[in-house]
Amino acid sequence: NAKSTLLVSGLHTFYLQGLQRLMDLKFYLDADPTLRVHWKLLRDQTERGYTRAEVEGQLDARKTDSDQFIEPQRQLADVVFSYQPTTPLTDQVGHADAAVSLQLCVVATTAIELDELLSALQEVPTLSVATKMRGTEFKVEASLSGDVSGADLYGIAQRIIPDVDELLTNPSGLHGGLQGIQQLMVLKAISQCLSQRKWRTDTLLKQEQAEL
């Protein structure tokens, strides 16, 4: 059977305006430029057998296309997730033994109701959560660091997302840490979107029945 919800993922997902108009929600995943280089060096050297020079050459060759076609899509997203190192990597870039501490920076349109979720995360003693409003842009910005278990995040999800068990078929699929927080925010946004879609459908149906 056809599904009512479709997830689309890719580097150029928002590039075509026709696709943009079909999307209820748009998420953009970003990382600090130095962090991206660090991750790519680690992956391509260990998993693909490339030399450091080869990886850096690839990055240089793709920079123009990235700046022209990928980075501008950031402005079209409803939610931007950006991973940032808490301290500069400097000469540790590409080294497997580099100790990298991360924070997750989130910028979301205020149309997505994240206040309750952010308040719940602020109550987790092992997390640091700072928020502020971008009033003129109608966006909320949050910076999160620290650690939290997937089980604790699932407990928060059960309190805040009424249909979480329908969206998340396996509770153990919810990661811990910053990745799990990102998952939780996506689930909250999708839940809100589906609820609004149902309300619109029900309202339209009632109007049609009233006209009969």
Image (cartoon, rainbow, N blue to C red):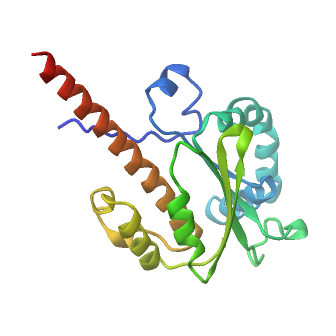
Q: Is residue 65 above or below residue 163?
A: above
Residue situated in front as seen by the camera: 110 or 84? 110
Q: Position of residue 165 (x, y in %)?
A: 29, 63
Where's residue 123, x and y in %? 56, 77
Count of picture labels: 0
Q: Is residue 98 left or right of residue 21?
A: right
Indicate left or right for 166 with 24 as reference: left
Residue at image point 65% right, 45% down: 139
Left or right, 119 with respect to 83, comes to left
Look at the image and tell me whether residue 179 can be seen: no
Q: Nearer the viewer, residue 35 or 75?
A: 75
Q: Nearer the viewer, residue 179 or 93?
A: 179
Is residue 181 depicted above or below 27 in this figure? below
The residue sitting at 53% across, 42% down in the picture is: 111
Residue at x 30% of width, y 58% of height: 163
- Quadrant of the rendering where the N terminus is positioned: top left
In this rendering, the answer to whether 103 lies above or below 151 is above
| Residue located farthest toward the front when viewing the structure as drawn | 210
Q: Position of residue 75 (x, y in %)?
A: 68, 35
Q: Name which residue lies at 24% across and 26% down.
A: 204
Whether residue 22 appears in this view of the structure is yes
Q: Nearer the viewer, residue 156 or 22?
A: 156
Q: Residue furthest top?
A: 212
Q: Position of residue 37 (x, y in %)?
A: 77, 56
> Hey, which residue is sitting farthest right in the picture?
91
* Residue farthest toward the left in the current orientation of the protein: 212
Looking at the image, residue 133 sits to the left or right of residue 56; the answer is left
Q: Where is the C terminus found, in terms of image quarters?
A: top left
